[in-house]
Amino acid sequence: MAAGRLGDTYGGYRARLLERLRAQGIQDLAVLRAFGETPRHLFVPEALRHRAYEDGALPIGHGQTISQPTTQARYLEALGLSGTERVLEIGTGSGYQAALLSHLARVVVSVERVPPLAQAALAALDEAAITGVVVVVGDGSLGWPAEAPYDAILVAAASPVVPKPLLRQLAEGGRLVLPLDVGQVPAEALRALPEPPGGGQVLVRITRQGGQYYAEPLGAALFVPLIGRHGFDQET
Ligand code: SAH
């Protein structure tokens, strides 16, 4: 694992984060390696760098957060990437998850609706010497048709419904992982979860197979709202 190889003073903290992820049940070695190779401290505000390797969400400005590492790791495991995929991320935020994805896929397109966040993410990706990530500004509930189809799509903001454009832009065999309003998921599917979601959101994986879409709930989720044409109207 590359936890000490980045030439910064955070290697020990990164190694501890990897231990924490393993203790939380993350087993995919490629995912763990991506965490070991990505300097999370470059993606959080400078004043919070000392907390960058804690397993928690942190504020990144504009009312948004960088998600909790365990959550992001579960997401990445659920996508089952092998390194060759074209991936679309909705909600660049800090750029950290896009950086993780760059280690796990061939092409990463990441859409952010708040321009200053997209700019800060680009600067952080640049500082971290991450290549292979394209950050664009727009309403990600419409997907990003110019680069479609995608083998994997992940949405880092919670949606009231599955945005139809994302289904259309999913390649055959592709996976879409997104947090959905709990009301959208059949009660019977929720009962199959190890722990019933207490809050209002469920992480769902949708697979496109033979022109059909199969949905599977993965667990409880807590994300900021997806704001856009196929999301929520405005910040609440
Ligand atoms: N993946 C991020 C965390 C994202 S937080 C990280 O690693 O830091 C969710 C992000 O989704 C926020 O930055 C928010 O501005 C963005 N967002 C919300 N609605 C969106 C939309 N319709 N299109 C694109 N981005 C959106």
Image: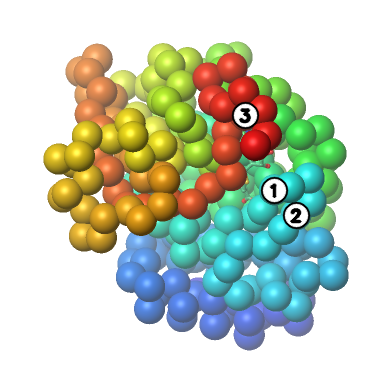
Q: Observer-nearest residue: 146 or 203?
A: 203
Rendering coords of residue 71 (x, y %): 47, 58
Distance Cα–Cα, label 2 vs label 1: 6 Å
Task: Give the residue displayed 81% in from the left and 55% down from the top.
Answer: 127
Query: Residue beneath label 3, please?
Result: 227
Corner quadrant of residue 92:
top right
Q: Is mark 2 within 8 Å of ligand 1?
A: yes
2 and 1 marks in contact (CB < 8 Å):
yes
Q: Is mark 1 within 8 Å of ligand 1?
A: yes
Rendering coords of residue 102 (x, y %): 58, 47
Neighbor class of circle 3 (other Cα within 10 Å; few <14, some 14-19, many 20+) is many
Which disc number belongs to residue 64? 1
Task: Give the residue displayed 63% in from the left and 85% down from the top.
Answer: 12
Relative placement, left or right, of 147 versus 7 is left
Relative placement, left or right, of 24 versus 157 is left
Count of numbered tags: 3
Rendering coords of residue 123 (x, y %): 83, 48
Residue type marked 1: Gln
Distance Cα–Cα, label 3 vs label 1: 12 Å
Distance Cα–Cα, label 2 vs label 3: 17 Å
Ligand 1 visible in quadrant: top right
Residue type marked 2: Ile
Image: 14 above or below 188: below
Residue type marked 3: Ile
Query: Residue beneath label 2, please?
Result: 60
Which disc number belongs to residue 194? none
Q: Is mark 3 within 8 Å of ligand 1?
A: yes
